[in-house]
Image (spheres, grey):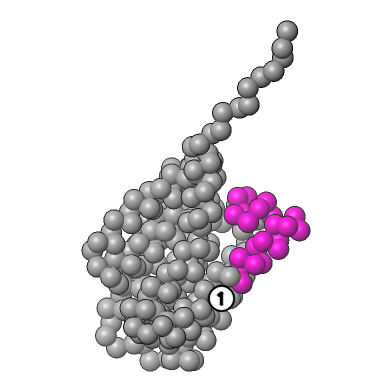
């Protein structure tokens, strides 16, 4: 009698969730968002690339490099750092590098909206980091929601449709069992209200803060 068994059916739900987790990870969104804000502020290719590169390098590329290095050397459990207790060093690294990037933007007199964006991201980072000490709030949802609000404020009401993307990211985090529904809702509210709220207040102030 044949003992052949058919291969297990692929779990498309899990596969889709994992794809969303990677394609819309915070590090990816932070690569793209500064480009959008810088383009609106400058309207020129070279300044857009130059200014957004400062934010992308210090708030995404370099911190992610540290996280990947740490995950490969066993310092924490993968590049998403699922274990809340392992997030301290990545958070400190991200904060230090982000503040360095902000200092570069200010000293080089970057466009004010880009400085406001960086300040908003840093404020949101401090808050989510503080929450994470006690509760594993979703950084994916926070960054996605914050980016949605910033784009809507920058380019118009049509960009509120990105709420669908925020919902997809939040669903994916729950689907792979990295977060609870409450944790993704908490992350989304934090990003939408705090980080982007700070951006809105700073950009709404016609006169930049005298540094």
| Residue visible at 23% across and 63% down in the picture | 157
Q: Nearer the viewer, residue 192 or 144?
A: 144
Residue 179 showing in the rendered view: no
* Quadrant including the C terminus: bottom left
| Magenta stretch contains residue 134 | no
| Magenta stretch contains residue 68 | yes
Rendered view: 6 above or below 139: above
For this view, does 45 lie left or right of residue 54? left
For this view, does 160 lie left or right of residue 53? left
Residue 96 showing in the rendered view: yes
| Residue visible at 48% across and 67% down in the picture | 30
Q: Which residues are magenta?
A: 62-83
Crowding at mark 1 (Cα within 10 Å: few <14, some 14-19, many 20+):
many
Residue 196 lies in quadrant: bottom left
What is the x, y in percent for residue 57? 56, 75
What is the x, y in percent for residue 200? 31, 72
For this view, does 204 lie left or right of residue 121? left
Circle 1 residue:
58
Residue 9 lies in quadrant: top right
* Quadrant including the N terminus: top right
Q: Nearer the viewer, residue 166 or 137?
A: 166
Rendered view: 172 above or below 210: above
């Amino acid at each position: 009698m044949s003992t052949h068994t058919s291969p297990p059916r692929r779990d498309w739900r899990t596969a889709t969730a994992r794809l969303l987790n990677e394609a819309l990870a915070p590090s990816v969104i932070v690569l793209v968002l500064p480009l959008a804000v810088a383009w609106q502020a400058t309207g020129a290719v070279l300044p857009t690339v130059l200014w957004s590169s400062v934010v992308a390098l210090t708030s995404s590329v370099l911190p992610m490099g540290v996280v990947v290095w740490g995950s490969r050397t066993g310092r924490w459990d993968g590049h998403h750092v699922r274990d809340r207790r392992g997030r301290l060093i990545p958070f400190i690294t991200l904060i230090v590098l982000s503040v360095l990037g902000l200092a570069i933007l200010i000293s080089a007199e970057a466009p004010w909206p880009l400085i406001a964006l960086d300040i908003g991201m840093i404020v949101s980072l401090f808050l989510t980091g503080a929450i994470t000490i006690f509760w594993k709030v979703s950084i994916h949802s926070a960054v996605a929601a914050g980016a949605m609000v910033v784009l809507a404020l920058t380019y118009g009401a049509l960009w509120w449709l990105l709420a669908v993307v925020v919902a997809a990211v939040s669903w994916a985090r729950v689907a792979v069992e990295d977060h609870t529904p409450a944790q993704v809702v908490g992350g989304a509210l934090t990003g939408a209200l705090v980080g982007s709220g700070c951006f809105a207040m700073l950009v709404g102030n016609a006169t930049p803060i005298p540094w």
